[in-house]
Image (cartoon, rainbow, N blue to C red):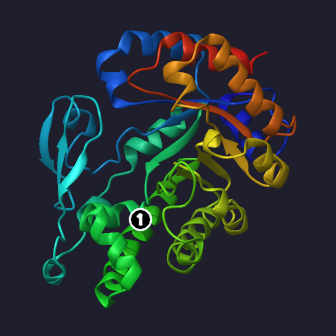
Amino acid sequence: MNSRERVKAALTFQHPDRVPRDLWALPYVGLFRKNELDELLAEFPPDLGGIQLSPGQSNDDQDRYRQAGSYVDEWGSTWFLGEPGVVGEVKKPAIASWADLAHFQPPWSLVRERDFSHANRAAEQSLRFILSPCTARPFERLQFLRGTEALFTDLAYGPAELRSLIEMVHAYYLEDIRGWCTSNVDGIMFMDDWGTNSALLIRPKTWREIFKPLYKEYVELIHAAGKFAFFHSDGHIAAIYPDLVEIGVDAVNSQLFCMNIEELGRLYKGKITFWGEIDRQHVLPFGGVEDVRAAVRRVRSALYDPSGGVIAQCEWGVDNRRENIRTVYETWLE
């Protein structure tokens, strides 16, 4: 099997010849530890490939992360980066007051003037499974536009302006996904970080009322185009796993070690593909090689089935030793 065939077999439970590999290297690693990254990728070539930037973006995210300081994103919010190579946080949201909404518009040119020729060539020339860049992230975008504290207050009180903003953001992301559906990528990714270490950030009932219908539309668009829907969310999201299965998400990337991995396997193995991960809060930054091996073996024992349903993904963070990341992929080959 080539890489594209291997990933598709895992997603459709058609017995891949081995578990597919995927590595997420944070910007810091690519900027300051590139030789180590290149050596690891040469030893364990990933089966998933990506278009690093969505063609049509006005700025290169990698350039933004090269130095500490501030920048204004395409939506008009001001970010601050405390150290180079690390994603920052919004300090001045574009819609700090609802009065700002009257004159606000999403950056439509990014999705309406996009040229997919770069993405199409990459997909045509590669044997890897090509995944789009992150598309929809409505919950996070609302935080970036309003500020996190203000958005949680909005969700609690439900002002009419919030509904208008959600509709605007959702319309933008629908157009974004429609565009990627016309391209040659194999899968389309969307995301939102929903969990703390122990629970969902909002009531599951609120999530189902407001955000689940948005995600359902995204998945329907993606599937109608014959592509696979990939979803990422940090934190403890066990409460919404059945909803992700119900709306047809093909692969979910979540922080397994925040949850009961064995219970997730018992409930959802064979119903969704577990797209990683290995514990990046404790094991990868602070553990030794044997800790990493034990973590991979635990995931494999709980989630693996020869028919598929698992992608060997992990994240390479700022403080992770290369040997720990290498051990992840070596152990998956046992």
- Up the image or down, 187 lies above or below 173; here it is above
Q: Return the residue at label 1.
A: 139
The furthest residue to the bottom: 160
Depth check: give the residue in front, 305 or 201: 201
Which residue: 47% across, 13% down? Answer: 321
Question: Which residue occupies the foreground of this view, 326 or 92?
Answer: 92
Where is residue 243 drawn, in percent x and y?
A: 67, 67
Depicted 178 relative to depicted 333: above or below? below
Q: Nearer the viewer, residue 145 or 231?
A: 145
Q: Quadrant of residue 69?
A: top left
Residue 210 image position (x, y, % from top left): 50, 78
Q: Say whether residue 5 is visible.
A: yes
From the viewer's perspective, is 174 left or right of 208? left
> Would residue 12 be seen by someone viewing this image from the given angle?
no
Q: How many marks?
A: 1
The residue sitting at 32% across, 47% down in the picture is: 55
Determine the secondary structure under disc 1: helix
At which x and y percent is residue 109? 24, 63
**Image quarter (top left, top right, bottom left or bottom right) of the C terminus:** top right
Quarter of the rendering containing residue 47? top right
Who's the residue at 68% across and 36% down the image?
311
Name the image quarter holding residue 205. bottom right
Give x and y (percent) for residue 60.
24, 39
